[in-house]
Amino acid sequence: MEKTWWHNAVVYQIYPRSFYDSNNDGIGDLRGVISKLDYLKNLGINVIWLSPVYQSPMDDNGYDISGYQTIAREFGTMEDMERLFKEANERDIKIVMDLVVNHTSDEHPWFVSARESRDSPYRDYYIWRDATPEGNPPNGIDSIFGGNAWEWDEKTGQYYFHLFSKRQPDLNWENPKVHQEVFKMMNWWIEKGIGGFRLDVIDLIGKEVDKGITGNGERLHPLLQQMNRETFGSKNILTVGETWGATPEIAKLYSAPERNELSMVFQFEHITLTWEGGDKWQPIPLDLKEFKDVLTKWQVELQDKGWNSLFWNNHDLPRAVSKFGNDKEYRVESAKMLATTLHFLKGTPYIYQGEEIGMTNVAFEQLSDYRDIETRRFYDVKTATGVSHEHMMDAIHKNSRDNARTPMQWNSSEHAGFTGGTPWITVNPNFPQINVEAALSDSNSVFHHYKTLIELRKSHEAIVYGTFTPVWQDHQYVFAYVREYQGEQLFIVSNFSEQEQTLQVPTRYQGDQVECLISNYAAPSAIDATMTLAPYESFAVKLK
Ligand code: TEU
Ligand code: CA
C-alpha cells in the first residue's frame, strides 16, 4: 500500500455551534475555534473536520446551505475563516470542510428561482414531478427525517423531492449543470488551501427517484470519479464520504486508491446494531459479540484494499462513553478503554469534540429543551402513530442527536465557560465535574490518555500499517487483537464489561517482559498464561 499523509492523521471534529462562543451571543463561532487551536495542538490532532459554517437559515444547523461561498453571520465572516486557515496552518493543522451537496437550503438562490416558475433556468437543479392522477405524491419514498419525501409546491403545481427536511430540497445530480456548479465551488475552496472534504450523505447522489432508488444508485461511483477528476484528484487532500449504506465491498469501491474516488468512508454498521430494525427510536442493548464481529469484518476486509475511518460518535450520534461504555461509576476507565480500542485499529481515527474529556449524553426532561429537527420531528411522527411519550423520551435520551450537541465543557463556571451569554442549547449539568480545565490539570484524565494515544500513533508504524489479527474472537466481553508490522507486535486487550474477566492467553502472546504502551489501570509488565482484567480494563503492550 502506498503511504500517504492521512494514513497517520488524527482528525478532530468540531461542531462550531457548540464549541466555543467568542462574542457571547450564545452560539459558538469561528473566532471561538481560533481561540482554541492551541488546546487542539496540545491534544496533538493534525486535522479538523469543521461541520458546516456556510450561510444557512439553520433549519438543520447548517446542513441546509443557502450560500456555499459565504460564512453564516452567526459564525463570523470570510475573513475569520481565512484567519482560521492561516492560524491552523501555522500549527500544522489542516481544515476539512463539510461538503453538503445532496441538497441545499430552500433559501439557496437556485431553489428560490427554481420554485418561481417551471421556466426558471434553475428548475432542473432540483427534482420535480407531477402529482399522480389521484393527486398523490409520485411515490412512497420516505424522508430520513420522517414523512413523505415529496413536498407539494402550490405555485408551480408540482412536487419537489427532499430526503431530509422540506427545507432541504435535493439537488438533481442527473443535471450536468449541477456537477459543474458544485465542482467550481469545490475548486474555489481547494484554492483557499483546505485540507479536504467530508462529503455529507454522499451515497445518495446517485439516486433514481422514479425507480425508488436513493442510496448506492448506479451513477454514484462514476459521479465520484468525475468529481475526483475535476476537483481534488490531483491535490493530495483527505476526502471522507458519509455512507450509511456501505458494506465492506462497497467501501472498497470508494476507497481503493486505483479507483480514484475518495480517501475513505464512514460506515455505520457498528452504530446501528443497537437500533432495532434500523430504527434509532427503538433502542436495544449492544451485543458485544456482534459489535466485535462487525469491527473485525471491516478490519479484515479493508486490510489490503481501501482504508477505514474509525469513530465511535459524531454530531449525529450519542456520546461514545454513554453508548459503549459506562458513563457513571466507570466513566473515566471506560472512556479510556474505548479510546485505546479505537486508536489501535487500522484506519484514520476521528475524535468528536468533548470525547477527549469523556463527555456524556444528556437527559433533558422536557422535549422543549431539545433543539434538533430530527428529534422534534420524530417525536411528532412517532407519537402520532401511538408510541408513548415515555417511550419517546427514553429513546431520545439514548439516541437524540442533541446528546452530541450540548456545549463543549471548558470549565466549571456558568454554562461550562462555553458562553458569557445564554447558550442556544442547555449545557449538560455534569459540567462542574467534566470539563477541559479539570482534565488538563489531572495527569490521569481521559484527555491525557488521548494525548498519549495520538503520540503513540506517530512513533509506531504498526499502529498505522500493521496487520490485524483478532484474539478471543468468540469472547462475549473482551475485545482483543494483535497488530504486526516489520517485526513489531502490539497486543491490545479491552474488557467491555463492568465485571472482572479471566482469560487463558495463547502461548504465542505470553511474555515475561512486555513494554506497556498505554493502560487505564496498572501497566502490565508481563503477559502470563492466565490474565484477569478489571472492569473496563484495557491496555496495549509491545510483545518482545
Ligand atoms: O446525516 C445523515 C443522516 O442520515 C443521519 O444523520 C440522520 O440524520 C440520522 O442521524 C440517522 O437516523 C448527515 C449529517 O451528518 C446530518 O447532521 C444532517 O442532518 C444530514 O446529513 C442532512 O444533511
Ligand atoms: Ca457567537
Image (tube, helix red, strand yellow):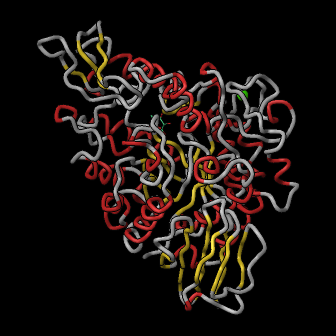
* Residue 80 higher or lower than 474, as above or below: above
State the count of labels: 0
* Residue 315 higher or lower than 370, as above or below: below
- At horizontal 72% and vertical 57% (from top left) the residue drawn is 91
Left or right: where does residue 479 sit relative to residue 187?
right
Q: Quadrant of residue 120?
A: top left
123, 314: nearer the viewer: 314
Which corner quadrant holds the C terminus? Answer: bottom right
Looking at the image, which residue sits at the far top? Answer: 155
Left or right: where does residue 285 sit relative to residue 133?
right
Indicate the position of residue 331 as horizontal and vertical percent values: 72, 52
- At horizontal 46% and vertical 54% (from top left) the residue drawn is 270
- Residue 454, can we see it? no
394, 1: nearer the viewer: 394
Left or right: where does residue 110 sit relative to residue 537?
left
* Residue 24 higher or lower than 349, as above or below: above
Q: Quadrant of residue 482?
A: bottom right
Indicate the position of residue 140 as horizontal and vertical percent values: 23, 26
Looking at the image, which residue sits at the far left? Answer: 133
Indicate the position of residue 20 as horizontal and vertical percent values: 73, 36
- At horizontal 22% and vertical 18% (from top left) the residue drawn is 137
- Residue 198, can we see it? yes
365, 76: nearer the viewer: 365
- At horizontal 51% and vertical 33% (from top left) the residue drawn is 69
63, 163: nearer the viewer: 163
Indicate the position of residue 242 as horizontal and vertical percent values: 43, 47
Which corner quadrant holds the N terminus? Answer: bottom left
